[in-house]
Image (cartoon, rainbow, N blue to C red):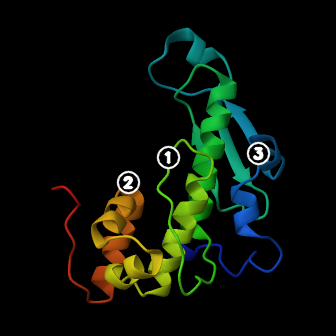
Amino acid sequence: MAFFSTVTGKIDAQYDRDAILVKSDRDLADMCNIDAFTASGPGGQHRNRNYTAIRVTLKIAPELVCSDTVSRSQKQNLEAALQKMRIKIACSWRKKAPELSDYQHLNEKNQLFALELAKLLDMVCACNFDHKSAAVRLGISNTMLLKELSRLPEVWQHFRSYRAELGLSELKLPGK
């Protein structure tokens, strides 16, 4: 379960994951080391000459690193990298799941998306990757849970591989 718990235990006692996930971009940036660099690839001279690409590293968990190079704007790349950091924290930092929880479907661009993803993954891990019991405890259908897990390809891939390791049946990508 490494993907879903790479930092759990190391920093869990000192910091509240949920509080970190809802921090503003400015406050989250204060918790990170931020590096600007030049990115290679398409984009012309502006991309190759200016330090617009951004890499953020969470100070309390240096193994969590995210970067973004899509935009020609350093500010937009920083915002995107911080959102990626929230998602990476949500995927790698587990907390004890409550007995029952209400899950709220949010757009990936919503700042609270990472918090909801973290709660969903907490429940899935607590139910030992049994999607049916996790769905019941979250108050959503099995299909909706699978759709939520498949929104981010890396989450879906790891979810399926952990189920396979546990000897659970293979699941198809929802809608396919």
Residue at the location (37% across, 71% down)? 159
Name the residue beneath numbered marker 1: 108
Name the residue beneath numbered marker 2: 151
Label 1 residue SS: loop
Q: Give whichever of discs 3 and 1 has the lower sequence position.
A: 3
Residue at the location (46% across, 24% down)? 41
Q: Quadrant of the C terminus?
A: bottom left
Q: Give whichever of discs 1 and 2 has the lower sequence position.
A: 1
Check contact, mark 1 vs mark 2: CB within 8 A.
yes
Q: Where is residue 95 in the image (x, y as percent from the top left)?
A: 63, 79
Q: Which kind of residue does numbered mark 1 sit on? A: Glu
Q: Which kind of residue does numbered mark 3 sit on? A: Ser
Name the residue beneath numbered marker 3: 24
Label 3 residue SS: loop
* Of residues 156 and 111, the one drawn nearer to the viewer in this rendering: 111
Q: Position of residue 38 (x, y in %)?
A: 62, 26
- Number of labels in the image equals 3
* Of residues 96 and 82, the one drawn nearer to the viewer in this rendering: 96
Q: In this view, does 51 lie above or below 23?
A: above
